[in-house]
Image (cartoon, helix red, strand yellow):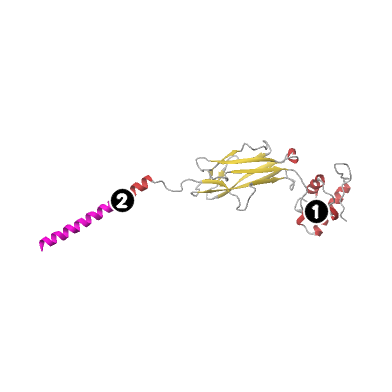
Amino acid sequence: GDVYKRQKEDCKMKRIFILMTVLAAGIVSQSCDEREIPTFGEERYIYVEWAKDVTDKNFICSFITTLEDDKTVGIPLRFAGRTLTEDTEYAVKLGTETDVTEGEYELPERFVFRKGYFQDTLYVTFTRSERMQQNSYKLVLNLVSNENFLATQRDATSATIIVSDMISQPEWWDETVINSYLGPYSDKKFRLFLSEIYSGDYGALSADEKRAYALQFKEYVEQNDIREDNNEPMVVPVV
């Protein structure tokens, strides 16, 4: 009986020893894992946020629908990674394709992503210049990596803004508008109409509203004896 009890106790001690050895090995392994494997997601990745269905990845700044000399364009940005607990700077570099000149645009003094947000906006202000009436120009901004954000997402780290004051015949200036309201199109007539009468979407107006604005324009043209560039009288046929 004593021999049997001693064998039973020996087996019990062996099982306890084996269990303690396994637990100790697990603790050591876990400790090594925590020390040697970095925490996932420490980095933040910044990129330009395009709409899903966008094919032409250019932002447009056109002065033809405003009388103001300054116009601001917003570029939506987003980042993936840890939440910002304080306002954090990101980095932007001017692209070599840029051909707007100093004085035609203004960037923020600092590029800052606000704390608590995963989406923010980079605002650029453009100033109208005379040469924009003859051609369009571009500002290219490239996100670059710094100590706070990595700019590595392919095709999403660059934004191009096309700016111009060039004018052209809009789609709504059709045969009905020509025959019943504003008359034959010319750049001079359109620019004058935008600056003096109505700078919104004329094509979206009702027939009564179109007629009312056309009558105002006709009165303005006749009172000021406005002529086309070829010195012919400017014609506004609305009655």
Tell me the quarter of the picture where residue 89 sits.
top right
Q: Which of marks 2 and 1 is nearer the N terminus?
A: 2
Numbered label attached to residue 174: 1
* Residue 78 counted in the magenta span: no
Numbered label attached to residue 27: 2
Instruction: Give the residues in magenta.
Output: 1-25
In the image shown, does 220 or 99 lie closer to the viewer?
Answer: 99
Tell me the quarter of the picture where residue 179 sits.
bottom right
Which mark's residue is nearer the viewer, 2 or 1?
1
Q: Dot 1: what SS?
A: loop
x 24%, y 54%: residue: 18
Asked if residue 78 is positioned above or below residue 104 in the image, the reply reads below
Is residue 107 something that shows in the picture? no
Q: Main secondary structure of the magenta part?
A: helix
Q: Mark 2 touching mark 1, by CB under 8 A?
A: no
Crowding around mark 1 (Cα neighbors within 10 Å: few <14, some 14 to 19, many 20+) is: some
Asked if residue 99 is positioned above or below residue 189 in the image, the reply reads above
The C terminus: image quadrant: bottom right
